Image: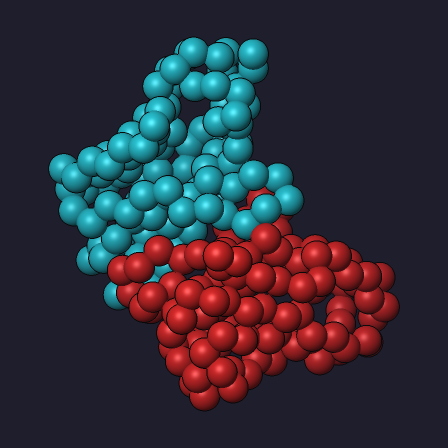
Amino acid sequence: NAGVTQTPKFQVLKTGQSMTLQCAQDMNHEYMSWYRQDPGMGLRLIHYSVGAGITDQGEVPNGYNVSRSTTEDFPLRLLSAAPSQTSVYFCASSYSRSGSPLHFGNGTRLTVT
Amino acid sequence: EDQVTQSPEALRLQEGESSSLNCSYTVSGLRGLFWYRQDPGKGPEFLFTLYSAGEEKEKERLKATLTKKESFLHITAPKPEDSATYLCAVQTPGGGADGLTFGKGTHLIIQP
């Protein structure tokens, strides 16, 4: 049972480059989300999705784009990387948006130079 | 605005030395409080959900309790493998786009 799988584990980008962080879950969860984790700060929500074809913004959405074409996949796109986007990114899924615990992937550590 | 404060920020214990981690919150309308464990280089791993004051949950050496203002994660006779960062999160009708507000975590080190 793989749970939530994120790729790549590590990535280095130059300022202005774009890339996609991949996330897939095999638990048939309707709810998926992306967080970033920075030192000294709690997890902050970037974007979320309550089902295929439905996405919405979280707390820190600027510079990121998402789509949800299937229940399983929820990629996060960085449109034009900036040093402020250096962070660890976590994808998570849960049975529902409210009241259910999140299941997290193991993260992507991104460095933007 | 919902607020979650975890204390202490870091805690170093000897193996077998029991202690408690605190998660205090100021929210309007709690839908649930979650505890997670996070190992270095890994994503948070779900431990417990608590929904109402007075509720308790246990798993091995861990016990989570909930009052109207705070939650405690009690660690009894910890072992070195319990070393991790412990995160709490509260879910409320007004807490962020997904209703979740995370604390900054308590970094726990258990020395042999």
Q: Nearer the viewer, residue A112 or A34?
A: A34
Is A32 drawn above or below residue B104 in the view shown? below
Compared across the picture, whether A28 is left or right of A84 comes to left
Percent of width and height locating residue B13: 49, 15
Chain in cyan in the render: B
Q: Residue at x 53, y 33 (%)?
A: B84
- Residue A36 falls in which quadrant of the image? bottom right
Q: Position of residue A15 (x, y in %)?
A: 83, 70
* Image position of A42 (left or right of A64): left
Up the image or down, A60 lies above or below B46; here it is: below
Image quadrant in which you'd find residue B7: top left
Tell me, by letter, which chain the rendering colours red: A
Q: Is residue B79 left or right of residue B35?
A: right
The percent position of residue B81, horizontal first and vertical second, equals: 52, 25
Residue at image coords 35%, 38%? B23
Q: Is B66 left, or right, of A10 in this rendering?
A: left
- From what the image shows, is residue B73 above or below residue A84? above
Q: Quadrant of the C terminus of chain A?
A: bottom right
